[in-house]
Amino acid sequence: MMADLDEDLLKWYEQVEKTAKLTPAQKAQITGAGAKAFASSLKQTTPMSSENYSGGRSVGHANVLHGKKPRKTKHLRDSITYKPGFTSDKLFSGNTSVGFEDKYQAMVARFVNNGTAGMSQKEVKNMHFIEKAQNRAKNEMLKAEAKKYKEVMGL
């Protein structure tokens, strides 16, 4: 009887150890699925400005350049990015970071998310869009990661 218990515990331990030790490539697949769900939610909650980034400032219905070249940046919504398995430091660890394409976009997102002095009612309404996206995507991320985990582990 005791030998059966020992064998069962050993088998159980080996299964737990197998599932707990993911390679970075396996981990990247799983966290990448969650990142995709979060990026989708973040894209939906990220506020859009009325500025036309392809041809200058939007004034009424006309685009006015005022002698300036078109902007080189994008709307925040269009600059959301992630690469499965890579952190924001561009290290392949299996963890996946979701963020914005460059430092400038990240800085603008921080100002919009956290707020600044003298904000309009519209700007106050847009505050904390990242936290809203996180709360909104929580279940979708878990489902996507669980599905990918089962797929990767062959369960």
Image (cartoon, helix red, strand yellow):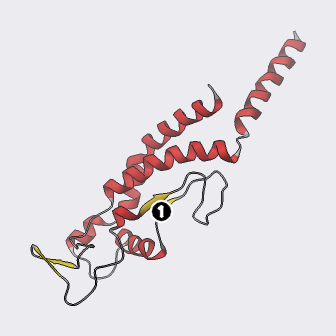
Q: Is residue 19 above or below residue 79?
A: above
Q: Amino acid at mark 1?
A: Gly
Q: At 73% from the left edge and 40% from the top edge, which residue is drawn?
A: 21
**Residue 128 shows in this picture:** no
User: What SS does tag 1 mark?
Assistant: strand
The residue wearing badge 1 is: 99
Quadrant the N terminus occupies: top right
Residue 43's image quarter? bottom left
Q: At 59% from the left edge and 35% from the top edge, which residue is drawn?
A: 149
Q: Position of residue 94 (x, y in %)?
A: 64, 51
Q: At 65% from the left edge and 61% from the top edge, which residue is drawn?
A: 91
Residue 15's image quarter? top right
**Residue 126 shows in this picture:** yes
Q: Position of residue 16 (x, y in %)?
A: 73, 31
Residue 104's image quarter? bottom left
Q: Is residue 126 above or below residue 6?
A: below
Q: Position of residue 34 (x, y in %)?
A: 50, 45
